[in-house]
């Protein structure tokens, strides 16, 4: 939200007063004096006029989790443990998952309270790759890579997947890079060839790679550098 709109939405200021406050350099965001009406502010911003705090802000939180099998990508579930159950953190209800994984899919999961950050990471428009290690029941033929690069048609949604890159590692293992996250997408892509996926592990989302030091069920905060990369 623009800072002028944030201030105008408060009952104590009208639009003219907001313009004067900015022109007189009386507004600060995160300790920096702001005069640009278009300056972006969010729920994490500390916003002051003179010495009065109008929004205290809250800390943005970012976590990397190694998701184990048998765990639901949800904030709550009546039957199964969720990924949030693995976090020993306060105020977990404020957190959400950036890019869900199926019940038995393992690997990199990112959890945050920053909606803008997670949208940049997961929206197809940003074209950030999601990379998976795939194990299949049958051999992976040479025609798979060509079909995935062209796009696989999903009749239920009446759409064709975005081009994906397949790297064959062995006769029944591969690394697949996609930029979407449609329902059971990887399994359905291999299902086009009637080849069942028996193991699926997410290694990377955009620039963020699963920390090799994390065992299944473990997590850690992202570093400042990792947060900035998205």
Image: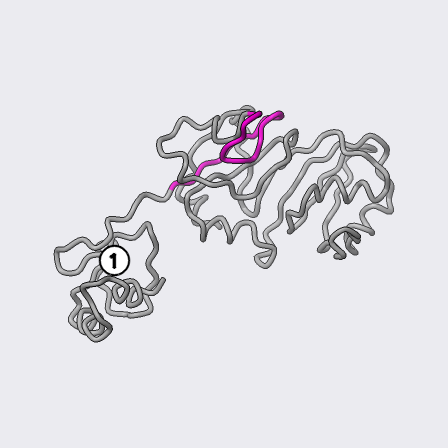
Q: Where's residue 175, x and y in %? A: 71, 39
Q: Seen from this angle, which residue lies furthest front?
A: 78
Q: Relative to the observer, which residue lies in front, 11 or 205?
A: 11
Which scheme is used to colour this image of the protein?
one colour
Disc 1 crowd rating (10 Å Cα; few below 14, some 14-19, many 20+) is some
- In the image, 59: left or right of 227? left
Q: Residue furthest bottom?
A: 16
Identified at 39% across, 43% down, the residue is: 224
- Which residue position is annotated with label 1? 29
Measured as percent of width and height from the top left, residue 111 is found at 47, 39
Q: Residue 199 lies in what quarter of the image? A: top right
Residue 190, x across and y down, in percent: 79, 41
Q: Is residue 185 above or below residue 126?
A: above
Magenta region, mostly helix, strand or loop? loop
For the residue pair 190 and 80, the one nearer the viewer reads as 80
Question: Which SS class for mark 1?
Answer: strand
**Image point (45%, 44%), residue name:** 226
Q: Quadrant of residue 54?
A: bottom left
Q: Please tell me which residue lies in front, 220 or 10.
A: 10
- In the image, is residue 16 part of the stretch drawn in magenta? no
> Is the N terminus in the top left, top right, bottom left or bottom right quadrant?
bottom left
Q: Residue at x 21, y 75 (%)?
A: 16
The residue segment tinted magenta is: 61-80
On screen, residue 48 above or below 80: below
Q: As displayed, is residue 38 above or below residue 229?
A: below
């Amino acid at each position: 939200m623009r800072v002028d709109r944030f201030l105008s939405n408060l009952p104590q200021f009208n639009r003219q007063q907001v313009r004067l406050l900015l022109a007189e350099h009386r507004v600060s965001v995160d300790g920096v004096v702001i005069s640009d009406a278009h300056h972006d502010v969010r729920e994490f911003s500390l916003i002051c006029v003179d010495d009065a705090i109008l929004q205290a802000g809250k800390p943005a939180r970012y976590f990397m989790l190694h998701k184990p099998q048998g765990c639901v990508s949800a904030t709550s579930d009546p039957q199964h443990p969720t990924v949030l159950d693995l976090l020993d953190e306060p105020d977990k209800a404020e957190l959400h998952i950036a890019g869900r994984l199926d019940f038995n899919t393992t690997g990199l999961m990112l959890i945050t309270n920053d909606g803008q950050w997670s949208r940049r990471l997961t929206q197809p428009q940003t074209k950030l790759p999601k990379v998976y290690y795939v194990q299949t029941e049958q051999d992976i033929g040479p025609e798979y890579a060509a079909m995935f690069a062209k796009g696989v048609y999903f009749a239920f949604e009446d759409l064709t997947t975005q081009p994906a890159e397949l790297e064959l590692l062995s006769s029944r293992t591969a690394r697949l890079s996609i930029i979407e996250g449609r329902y059971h997408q990887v399994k359905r892509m291999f299902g086009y060839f009637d080849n069942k996926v028996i193991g699926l592990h997410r290694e990377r989302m955009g620039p963020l790679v699963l920390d090799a030091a994390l065992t299944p069920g473990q997590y850690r905060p992202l570093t400042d550098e990792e947060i900035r990369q998205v």
